[in-house]
Image (cartoon, rainbow, N blue to C red):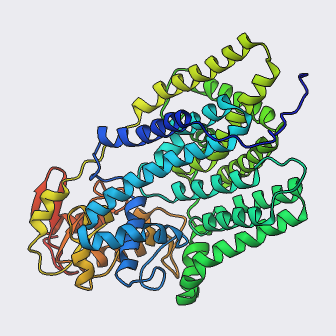
Amino acid sequence: MGMTAALLPAPTRPALNAWLVAVVATTAFATRLVPVLRGHGLEGLSGYDGPVYYTAAAGLANGLLPYRDFLLLHPPGIVLALLPFAAVGRIVGHSEALTAAGVFWMALGAVNAVLVSRILRPYGRVAALAGGLFYAVFLPAIRVEESTTLETVTSLCLLGAMLLVSRPMTNRMLPTRVFVLAGVLLGLSAGVKIWGVVIGVAVVVWCFAAAGRRAGIATLLGSALGVTAVCLPFFLSAPSAMWRMVVEDQVGRRRVGVPWEVRLRDMVGLSEIHVRHDLTVLVLVLVAVAVGFALAALSRTGRLAATVFLTSWVLLVTSPSWSVDYASLAAPPLAVIVGAAAAQLLIWFRWRVTQVLVAVGLAAGLVLYATMSLPNWVVDEPFPGRELGRVLADTPGCVTSDHPAALIQTRVLQRNLDRGCVLMADLGGYSYDLRPGADLQVGRARNPQWQAFALDYLRGGDQTMIVRFLNASGYSPQTVSIIDDWPTTARHGEYTVRQPEPAGTGRR
């Protein structure tokens, strides 16, 4: 086969070998679990966003609706995904249920890695292993699959859709139902995170181009069905509030001046690798990505991944806000590109010796990347939930906190809900939702409307715990001064339980 030959889909779809599934799944699960165990453990502060979504699900399990009864800045899909755990949490305890959900989300990360391998299996075991193991050790994917985040579910839906529409075709088109089901998965993804709308459009366009009008229309209709099934009941309960929170608040987010090279570094998984000549390393990695992109585009599946990958990168580079977690958006298509490029290299280098060298080179690259990045990534946020929970056990009224995990880990979330206390799933998120007159382009510390809102909420409890904004990262100096004046009820390490005082009181 010549150097210009395209990589053709296999006429059949061979099954994944059990050993291949075991290697990919075990590696992926371990790379997600071990950093948590090395750091805070399964009952620590596992980030902010994951507990926000779990708390929202706990509210729904207790009859409260997002948008109508409490703020949720995303579509409701993540709440529905976590609802079974929250329902069990009412019985066994939300701390235990959140821990179980976190482990389950890690397992979903392993499933995502296996799905990458399944997509690539028609191109050989080396391609399947290369793509699956790349996803397993790729830091942007690991970051978001260690707790109950949106991205774990959206990646699952996207990879499922890519698996369906990339199925090899011989002499006939894929059945229409395949494209409908793929569209439903894309719609579910958009029902979890609004960015899924853009990715879904990219896949629909690819289906029109690669499989024809019937396939494109079927995918589009399936997408509409999926997102409607998730969102419509909640939209009918609070249409204006849901539109404001999910659409307007996202569009109006504060623009952050994160340089393009930082975004690119995060996207290619270099955020935890710090060496001399960082910019040179980044350029070399981007060149490798471009070469892989070109190689993968020679195959049908590779062109699908390239379409999704390019769309993801444009979305990430132009996003007004930025978090290193956003980089996970590009992880699924990038992993497929790696596997498709590996398959193309094996076809070009037909001699057995050169094929072995290619496979060994890929393995060495993955090992080198993993040993340079993963040891630097430790989730280290211990929290004395049980100790503080014993202090709060006799609190007669409500307990407030600026971090939902604090309420979960101290075992007071369900008690708050049973007592009719205000459900504050995302106190920080209100900085994007306060209207009218709020300047959304300033940080929380310079937003007097949010400062007043936060103080009013914290004062609504008989006891309060300041956890997320402990070091004045969100509170203004005036707010910190007021909180510091509140009497201390208990202290454990750096965390303090205080008794809020009404406005106008205090020693200062």
Q: Is residue 492 above or below residue 28?
A: below
Q: Position of residue 313 (x, y in %)?
A: 69, 47
In terms of image quadrants, where is residue 392? Answer: bottom left
Q: Position of residue 178 (x, y in %)?
A: 74, 62
Tell me what residue is drawn at x 37 percent, y 67 percent: 85
Residue 163 is at least partly visible in this image: yes
Tell me what residue is drawn at x 28 percent, y 66 percent: 94
Q: Quadrant of the N terminus?
A: top right
402 left or right of 359 in image: left
How many numbered callouts? 0
Q: Position of residue 64 (x, y in %)?
A: 39, 83
Q: Is residue 302 above or below residue 400?
A: above
228 left or right of 22 in image: right
Tell me what residue is drawn at x 90 percent, y 50 percent: 171
In terms of image quadrants, where is residue 490? Answer: bottom left
Outermost residue to the bottom: 237
> Looking at the image, which is closer to me, 490 or 2?
2
Q: Position of residue 395 (x, y in %)?
A: 11, 75
Q: Is residue 362 above or below residue 211?
A: above
Residue 426 is at least partly visible in this image: no
Q: Is residue 281 above or below residue 180?
A: above
In terms of image quadrants, where is residue 359? Answer: top right
> Looking at the image, which is closer to me, 9 or 305?
9
62 left or right of 249 in image: left
Q: Quadrant of the C terminus?
A: bottom left
